[in-house]
């Protein structure tokens, strides 16, 4: 299955991001802690150029904590400051301004040397759809300013948002890229909810999730669905999960569509535990 999703407003947003770069001091790049590389837009490296950047690994509460630590180290080894947070609950937000100040210290020192008083940090927040940008902004601003939603593509316009006296945020729409060179990236985005379910095949996505769990989190998979061993045959595996969870059609047959939905829902609602679908050792970036 080929997964693509590039609505027209995203092309416009990409142009607007490029135009607004000169107005900001730093880029806050928000990624999903479960897929820190797959949820990074590769075009952003070209778009933001040499602008200082802080990577924010959101949804840390849903990601494998050991791998989150490994990803923070991965980014910092490449000269990019990274911190993890949970925007939904407001955990880790205090570290954002602190980290931004550290990154921008050379610029602020130059301003002081010229007799200029440091002003509020102006940051542009960038991320793919459904990564939690609006939730983060509302948490930082302590009020509902940015529109939020649990489906991709809610934010479609840019707006400046003041966060206390130390920070001003330029929100931007979520931007995916026109073509996924690696189709596995598409699967990872789909399984974590970054692509609308209405344009993907949930059975295919659930198969990907099951095979990934079998390889990387077999104990979790067995415990959740009461498996002594994981069947190599996909139909057997679906039949077992469907029967175990009551996804049955009239007549006693397993409803594979409902079973697929159940598996994806279990992944996204952390019923299978804290999972990470990207691993530093597997990336060439």
Image: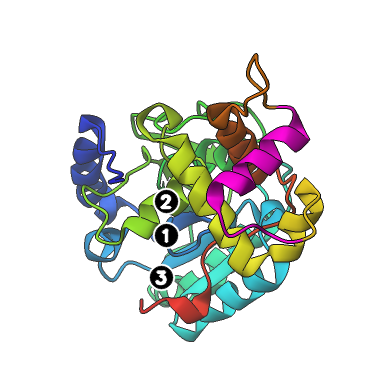
Count of marks overlaid on the render: 3
Tag 3 residue? 111
Asked if the residue at tag 1 contacts the one at tag 2, i.e. Cβ–Cβ closer than 8 Å, the answer is no
Q: Residue at x 63, y 51 (%)?
A: 59
- In the image shown, does 241 or 49 lie closer to the viewer? 241
User: What secondary structure characterizes most of the magenta part?
Assistant: helix
Q: Residue at x 43, y 33 (%)?
A: 152
Rendered-image quadrant of the N terminus: top left
Tag 2 residue? 187
Judge left or right: residue 151 versus residue 144. left
Q: CA distance from mark 2 to mark 1?
A: 9 Å
Q: CA distance from mark 3 to mark 1?
A: 37 Å
Q: Residue at x 49, y 53 (%)?
A: 208
Q: Position of residue 125 (x, y in %)?
A: 43, 49
**Magenta segment, which residues?**
229-246
* Front disc: 2 or 3: 2
136 vs 75: above or below: above
Location of residue 265 by image quarter: top right
User: Is residue 265 one of those drawn in magenta?
Assistant: no
* Front disc: 3 or 1: 1
Residue 164 visible in the current orientation = no
SS for tag 3? helix
Determine crowd level at label 3: few under 14, some 14-19, many 20+ residues with C-alpha closer than 10 A. Answer: some
Residue 96 visible in the current orientation = yes
- Here the colouring is rainbow
Asked if the residue at tag 3 contacts the one at tag 2, i.e. Cβ–Cβ closer than 8 Å, the answer is no
Q: Position of residue 225 (x, y in %)?
A: 76, 47
Q: Position of residue 273 (x, y in %)?
A: 75, 53
Determine crowd level at label 2: few under 14, some 14-19, many 20+ residues with C-alpha closer than 10 A. Answer: many
Tag 1 residue? 38
In primary-sequence order, the first of circles 2 and 3 is: 3
């Amino acid at each position: 299955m080929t997964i693509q999703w590039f609505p027209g407003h995203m092309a416009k947003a990409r142009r607007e991001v490029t135009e607004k770069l000169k107005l900001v001091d730093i880029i806050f790049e928000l990624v999903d802690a479960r897929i820190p590389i797959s949820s990074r837009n590769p075009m952003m490296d070209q778009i933001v150029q040499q602008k200082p950047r802080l990577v924010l690994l959101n949804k840390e509460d849903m990601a494998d904590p050991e791998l989150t630590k490994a990803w923070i180290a991965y980014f910092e080894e490449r000269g990019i400051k990274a911190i993890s947070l949970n925007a939904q609950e407001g955990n880790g937000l205090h570290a954002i301004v602190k980290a931004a100040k550290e990154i921008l210290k050379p610029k602020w020192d130059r301003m002081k040397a010229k007799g200029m008083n440091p002003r509020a940090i102006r940051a542009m927040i960038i991320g793919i759809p459904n990564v939690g940008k609006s939730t983060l902004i509302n948490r930082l601003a302590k009020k509902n300013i940015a529109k939020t939603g649990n489906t991709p593509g809610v934010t479609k316009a840019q707006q400046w948002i003041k966060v206390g006296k130390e920070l001003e945020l330029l929100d931007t729409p979520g931007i995916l890229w026109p073509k996924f060179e690696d189709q596995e990236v598409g699967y990872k985005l789909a399984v974590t909810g970054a692509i609308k379910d209405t344009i993907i095949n949930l059975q295919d996505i659930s198969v990907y999730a099951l095979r990934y769990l079998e390889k990387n989190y077999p104990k979790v998979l067995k415990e959740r669905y009461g498996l002594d061993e994981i069947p190599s045959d996909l139909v057997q595996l679906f039949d077992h999960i469907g029967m175990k969870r009551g996804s049955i059609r009239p007549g006693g047959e397993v409803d594979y569509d409902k079973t697929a939905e159940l598996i994806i829902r279990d992944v996204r609602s952390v019923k299978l535990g804290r999972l990470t679908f990207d691993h530093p050792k597997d990336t060439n970036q």
